[in-house]
Amino acid sequence: MKKYLVIGNPIEHSLSPLLHNYWIKENGINAIYEKRELKAKELEKTILEVKDEKISGINVTVPYKKLVIEFLDELTPVANITKSVNTIYKKTGKIIGDNTDVGGFENSLKNINYKPEGKKAFILGAGGVAPSIIFALEKMGVAKIILSNRTKQKAEDLKKIYPNIEIVSWGDSVQSDIIINATSLGLKNHDDIKLNYETLGPNKLFYDVIYNPTNTKFLLKGKELGNKTENGKAMFVYQAQLSFEIWHKIKPKINSKVFEILTND
């Protein structure tokens, strides 16, 4: 039986095992998918399990999407540009790092018929999934990207990869068409984002990469002010579909049953 993992810290919120094990069963694959909370010092040892074929594939979540890179043999072009890896596998004896977050985010916007072309995006957070979101938005023709991060240096590092982005101080409120929370603020109920929501106004898209809980404070506040909201569930499902296809060479179906399973958990 093949074994697959999602690694991160914290990891208890992850619904990856639920989704992947559902698809594994649906497609009659002899495999199991589990979650494993790791400390940074345990990353190398775990990734070597892919080389030894004890593990057939790994998904990576916060805070390790960048940290895993030094233990990989090769990156796909998109993982190399974004310097962010969420999918690991072995190919021709090498451990490969890939990024399916870009496609996941892109497909999630297409799923709600949202076209960012010519629009202005305001992104909160520079770690984890932020490089993938910037890559996807630029690919989809966004006019302007403004970035805010608690640690300004992290934002400056991203500007080296994406020179067209504009950086503002954490807590600044910026007029835009789409506001994206790419931080982990919202995973816990008491989490709050330093933002003057009232100045942002209505008729925008508030997008949160967090999918569990379904409604973060950020999304509830956006809804209250008359904005359209979208959590990270569709992005999560679409990036998982791409990872599953890489590993199993089968494109699993995304239907209402998939979202039902994740909602009922």
Image (cartoon, grey):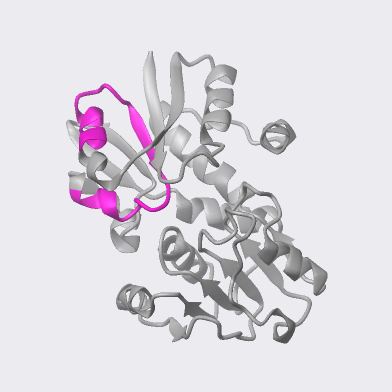
| 257 relative position to 47: left or right | right
Instruction: Out of 226 and 94, give the one closest to the viewer.
Output: 226
Specify the quadrant that holds the C terminus: top right
| 241 relative position to 66: left or right | right
Relative image position of residue 117 (x, y in whole percent): 60, 73
Q: Residue furthest front?
A: 190
Tell me how many marks there are. Answer: 0
Tell me what residue is drawn at x 35 percent, y 56 percent: 84
* Residue 221, placed above or below residue 54: below
Q: Is residue 114 visible?
A: no
* Residue 238, placed above or below residue 24: below
Residue range (magenta): 45-70
Specify the quadrant that holds the N terminus: top left
Instruction: Out of 165 and 253, give the one closest to the viewer.
Output: 165
Magenta region includes residue 54: yes
Q: Is residue 165 visible?
A: yes
Tell me what residue is drawn at x 56 percent, y 37 percent: 15
Relative image position of residue 217 (x, y in whole percent): 69, 63
Relative image position of residue 103 (x, y in whole percent): 49, 52
Tell me what residue is drawn at x 21 percent, y 44 percent: 72
